[in-house]
Image: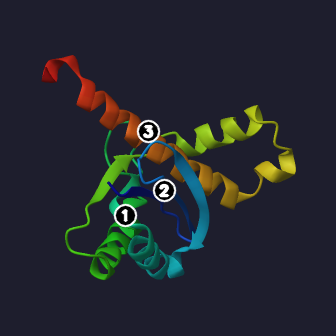
């Protein structure tokens, strides 16, 4: 069983998170300049044995893709070209992840100055996306309707 990686795309930088090899804990890896993301992900996948990449999909309240998808879609297409063909890229709804990241920062006692660091917010958002994805898979695998 390999790791699952998550990416919170941004125009300037991307938050990145990954699970441990047993897929129990999601940990923020930091931020990467969007221009350097493909090289970073390619190297991480090769070194760490990643089985899937979850990408935050910005969605409006009505469930439709947000305007941000117009720059995320081409970035994903470029990323796919540098990764193994059988490595799945999974779009996952990222609504409210930035809000949850800010709330988590406040709840953990981070100072106002620390909370202004957008890199920390991006990393936390990627971690939240990955945790939410893991929880959704756990629920789907244990859903009574599947029994």
User: Mark 3 = which residue?
Assistant: 132
Cα separation between marks 3 and 2: 13 Å
Task: Find residue 85 and report its image quarter.
Answer: bottom left
Residue at figure coordinates x 68%, y 35% from the top left:
103
Count how many numbered circles sit on residues in the image: 3
Residue 75 versus residue 37: which sits nearer the camera?
37
Residue at left 20%, top 17%?
Answer: 144
Q: Nearer the viewer, residue 46 or 127?
A: 46
Colour scheme of the picture: rainbow
Other residues around mark 1 within 10 Å, as few (<14) / some (14–19) / many (≥20): many
Marks 1 & 2, CB-CB < 8 Å contact: yes
| Figure quadrant of the N terminus | bottom left
Q: Nearer the viewer, residue 126 or 96?
A: 126
Mark 3 and mark 2 residues within 8 Å of each other at the beta carbon? no
For marks 1 and 2, give the CA distance. Answer: 9 Å
User: Can you say which quadrant of the picture contains the C terminus?
Assistant: top left
Q: Which residue is mark 2?
A: 18
Secondary structure found at label 3: helix
Q: Position of residue 5 (x, y in %)?
A: 43, 58
Residue tagged 1: 50
Lower position in the chain sequence, tag 1 or tag 3: 1
Give coordinates of residue 29: x percent, y percent.
Answer: 59, 61
Residue 50, image quadrant: bottom left
Mark 1–mark 3 Cα distance, whole angstroms, equals 18 Å
Query: How far across and how far down the image is residue 142, in percent?
Result: 26, 25
């Amino acid at each position: 069983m390999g790791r699952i990686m998550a990416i919170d795309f941004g125009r300037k930088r991307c938050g990145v998170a990954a699970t441990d090899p047993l897929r129990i804990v999601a940990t923020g890896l930091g931020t990467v300049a969007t221009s350097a993301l493909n090289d970073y992900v390619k190297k991480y996948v090769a070194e760490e044995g990643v089985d899937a990449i979850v990408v935050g999909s910005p969605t409006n309240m009505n469930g439709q893709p947000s305007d941000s998808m117009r720059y995320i879609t081409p970035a994903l297409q470029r990323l796919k070209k540098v990764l193994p063909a059988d490595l799945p890229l999974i779009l996952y709804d990222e609504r409210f992840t930035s809000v949850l990241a800010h709330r988590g920062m406040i709840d953990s006692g981070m100072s106002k100055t620390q909370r202004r660091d957008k890199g920390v917010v991006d990393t936390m958002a990627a971690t939240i996306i990955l945790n939410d994805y893991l929880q959704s898979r756990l629920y789907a695998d244990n859903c009574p309707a599947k029994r």
